Image (cartoon, rainbow, N blue to C red):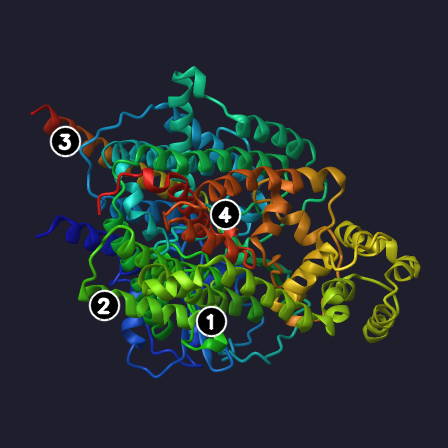
């Protein structure tokens, strides 16, 4: 039998087996679930296995949802830990202890990684990261104790030799890194060809704020660091030194307010705490992770195979659709999707657009999965054109679900971007010469640009006063201005001042100046400055107009209302993947239904996310290499830059940089654009 | 509904009231009557939640639902997982040994 097939079956069996094991001689039998048998399940908690329960109830017409109970003890793993009925739906709680998940999921994903074929090159890795990195990871368990204490009954925060919980984590992480050392010595250079599978396997440990790729990336980054120290000329770059300076600020600026963020859909790639220990963990690990990802690309240039990458994209994209659909229609598959693939949030329960993100589970947001599907389509197009790949009829078998996935993600911006690119590709490669020459003549181009500018001017002329202030209006509405008892009266007071366009007076009333966020104050001062150059729009007005047309006015308005850094935080940020100060540090007024007040209000722009983490200085620093790469490749014939441009444009209006797989995709697009045609591609 | 009397008595003591255990089922509107003669018992569930019960019937009902007067410590669970980790280490060592042997050959 095929070795890969055996590995896959083994991985599946290891995932399922804890949910089958039970004592058939204990005299406790599973009963058909009904209102009268709920009590029986409550009195036999942790005795009946999920398989027993499922087999008994599978033919019944019941509305069941299998809830994972990560807090439950190990003896409850795979067993029914409780049943509740809400409305007509039964919520069956299944024990999935967080520490046991760490072992189970590591084993499963290591088996999946074994599917990556070995390359001829052998890399000898140092033993140092195997010993040191588990200690670094321990910092997270110490620093983010509020997260772990609410997610694992076994969690013990005591720093003592008798703390077996910490010993367990150390040993498991040590084993994981030892296996990585072994596994990657022959597969390292093939990693890049299979990286798109990180979208199918988000690989976030259930009940933990850990992600296996983040750990793996940091592990490779540590190896890169060790390798570079051997070459004393190349150890640290300007970016390393800058990061070090930033780190000193981040650590010294630790907030005394111990804000806690339950991580929600960002689990595995966000700091849940504000302690200096957790900050240190994220600073070190993020640094190593980014280094590790670039290390993979740097050493895999010769092994990169666009045909293999295309196949990985196809498998990943189409299986997301298949398993997403299956999970939405079968509660039991929905449950195992979470465990097997390592979803950071449970998959959708119903296959309808009203559920919001149709591919939730595999992707934290509809936008990011839409970008992924769009990226695949563009990648395939460029693969056919630039890499002289051949179209096969079997490609359609994969492309159709991917196109369907994009359609269901409702990501209009991606569809527009792809359509524009298709038009451009048609123009560049397929348009007949006379017409092409005519269109590309200087006169035609200048005429089109002038016409567009005139049309834009006429279009905006009447609406300009409205459009240019809409963003600040939204931000003002969400500030906690005025303190009348009635929210409606507060709203009317703000509205009146906005109609009068009198933001300065608004800030002087009712202590509003103190309640305004620093970002808001800065934007108001830019917007109300006395210098006014005719026909040159104010930068705030310009952003406001853009926000309006891309449907981001409200979300960016909330961001401005919430973002309240002091001067140094504005320059250096709060630290990598530290969002707590932004989320909880400043009081805002949200005009949403009560049940949504506790929801997660992200900035809805990756640029704003970077601003929160790395401040203005960090954002400028990061933008230099990206602008540099685009500048260098803008006029060359290579088309790979469109992948990067596509992602940047879409990420400006989404939070995708907060999701590990989208972040890696961006680094990949950046790297192949940077290398451009110098890559020796073997398709 | 049947109750495991031994399990209940471990947490709640014996039933001195003489009142038989009523069939509460999953009735969310059932109201437990306080028993002034009953010493308040603190119960814990698997999720670490805590509840104080004021009568034997109430106590029996919760114990029947998986609650217990003893904190359900995760210590044993950690030991079990440590043992499992030890087995994985052995497995890893074994495969590494096989791999090296094969490479040497």
Judge if badges 2 and 1 mark residues of a common chain. Answer: yes
Residue, disc 2: A397
State the SS at label 2: helix
Distance, label 2 to label 1, CA atoms, is: 22 Å
Q: Viewer-nearest of labels 1 and 4?
A: 1
Question: Between A106 and A99, which is closer to the camera in this rendering?
Answer: A106
* Residue under the point 16% across and 54% down: A5
Residue A518 to residue A82: above or below: above
Number of marks drawn: 4
* Residue under the point 36% across and 61% down: A425
Distance, label 4 to label 3, CA atoms, is: 37 Å
Callout 2: residue from which chain?
Answer: A
Q: Viewer-nearest of labels 3 and 1?
A: 1
Quadrant of the image occupied by residue A532? bottom right
Q: Viewer-nearest of labels 2 and 3?
A: 2
State the SS at label 4: loop
Horizontal side, residue A9 vs residue A514: left or right: left
Sequence-wise first label, 2 or 1: 2
Residue A589 to residue A680: above or below: below
Q: Which mark is residue A269?
A: 4
Residue, disc 1: A410
- Please tell me how crowded label 4 is: few (under 14), some (14-19), or many (20+) other residues with Cα within 10 Å: many
Sequence-wise first label, 4 or 2: 4
């Amino acid at each position: 039998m095929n070795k890969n097939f055996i590995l896959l079956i083994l991985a599946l069996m290891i995932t399922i087996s804890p949910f089958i094991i039970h004592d058939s001689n204990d005299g406790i039998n599973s009963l058909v679930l009904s209102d009268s048998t709920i009590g029986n399940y409550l009195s036999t908690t942790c005795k009946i296995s999920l398989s027993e329960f499922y087999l008994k109830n599978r033919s019944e017409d019941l509305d069941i949802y299998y809830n994972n109970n990560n807090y439950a003890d190990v003896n409850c793993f795979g067993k029914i830990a409780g049943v509740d009925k809400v409305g007509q739906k039964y919520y069956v709680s299944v024990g999935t202890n967080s520490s046991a998940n760490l072992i189970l999921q590591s084993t499963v994903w290591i088996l999946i990684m074994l599917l990556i074929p070995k390359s001829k090159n052998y890399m000898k890795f140092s033993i140092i990261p195997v010993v040191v990195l588990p200690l670094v990871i321990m910092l997270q368990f110490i620093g983010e104790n509020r997260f772990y204490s609410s997610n694992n009954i076994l969690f013990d925060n005591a720093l003592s030799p008798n703390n077996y919980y910490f010993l367990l984590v150390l040993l498991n992480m040590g084993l994981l890194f030892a296996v990585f050392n072994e596994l990657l010595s022959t597969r390292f250079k093939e990693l890049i060809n299979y990286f798109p599978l990180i979208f199918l396997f988000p690989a976030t440990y259930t009940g933990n704020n850990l992600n296996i790729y983040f750990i793996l990336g940091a592990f490779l980054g540590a190896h890169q660091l060790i390798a570079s120290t051997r070459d004393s000329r190349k150890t640290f770059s300007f970016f390393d030194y800058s990061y070090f300076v930033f780190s000193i600020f981040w650590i010294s600026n630790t907030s005394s307010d111990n804000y806690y963020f339950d991580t929600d859909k960002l689990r595995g790639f966000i700091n849940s705490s504000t302690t200096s220990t957790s900050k240190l963990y994220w600073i070190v690990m993020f640094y190593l992770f980014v280094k590790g990802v670039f290390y993979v690309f740097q050493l895999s240039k010769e092994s990169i195979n666009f045909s293999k990458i295309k196949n990985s994209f196809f498998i990943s994209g189409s299986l997301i659709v298949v398993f997403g659909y299956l999970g939405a229609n079968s509660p039991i598959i929905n449950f195992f999707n979470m465990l097997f693939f390592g979803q950071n949030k449970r998959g959708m329960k119903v296959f309808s657009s009203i559920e919001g993100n149709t591919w939730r589970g595999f992707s934290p947001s509809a936008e990011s999965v839409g970008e992924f599907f769009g990226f695949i389509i563009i990648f395939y197009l460029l693969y056919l054109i630039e890499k002289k790949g051949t179209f096969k009829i079997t490609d359609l078998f994969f492309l159709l679900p991917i196109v369907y996935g994009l359609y269901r993600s409702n990501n209009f911006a991606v569809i527009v971007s792809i359509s524009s690119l298709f038009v451009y590709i048609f123009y560049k490669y397929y348009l007949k010469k006379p017409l092409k020459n005519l269109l590309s003549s200087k006169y035609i181009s200048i005429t089109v640009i002038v016409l567009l500018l005139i049309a834009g001017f006429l279009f905006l002329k009447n609406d300009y006063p409205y459009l240019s202030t809409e963003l600040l209006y939204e931000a003002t509405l969400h500030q906690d201005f005025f303190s009348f008892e009635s929210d409606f009266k507060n709203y009317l007071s703000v509205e009146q001042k906005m109609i009068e366009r009198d933001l300065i007076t608004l800030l002087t009333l009712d202590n509003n100046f103190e309640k305004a966020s620093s970002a808001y104050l800065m934007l108001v001062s830019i917007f109300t400055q006395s210098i006014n150059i005719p026909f040159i729009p104010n930068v705030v007005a310009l952003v406001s107009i853009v926000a309006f047309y891309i449907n981001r006015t409200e979300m960016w308005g909330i961001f401005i209302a919430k973002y309240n850094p002091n001067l140094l935080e504005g320059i250096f940020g709060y630290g990598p993947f530290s969002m707590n100060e932004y989320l909880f540090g400043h009081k805002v007024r949200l005009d949403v239904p009560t049940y949504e007040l506790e929801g997660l209000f992200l900035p809805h722009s990756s640029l704003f996310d970077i601003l929160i983490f790395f401040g203005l200085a960090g954002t400028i620093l990061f933008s230099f290499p990206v602008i540099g790469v685009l500048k260098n490749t803008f006029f060359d014939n290579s088309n790979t830059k469109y992948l990067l441009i596509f992602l940047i444009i879409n990420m400006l209006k989404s939070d995708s940089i907060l999701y590990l797989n989208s972040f890696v995709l961006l680094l990949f697009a950046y790297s192949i654009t940077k290398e451009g045609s110098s890559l020796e591609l073997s398709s | 509904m049947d109750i495991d009397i031994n399990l209940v008595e471990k947490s709640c003591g014996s039933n001195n009231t003489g009142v038989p255990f009523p069939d509460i089922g999953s009735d969310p509107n059932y109201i437990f009557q306080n028993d002034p003669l009953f010493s308040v018992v603190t119960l814990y569930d698997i999720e670490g939640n805590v509840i104080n019960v004021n009568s034997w019937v109430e106590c029996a009902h919760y114990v029947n639902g998986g609650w217990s007067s003893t904190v359900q410590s995760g210590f044993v669970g950690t030991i079990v997982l440590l043992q499992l980790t030890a087995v994985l280490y052995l497995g890893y060592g074994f495969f590494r040994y096989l791999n090296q042997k094969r490479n040497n050959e």
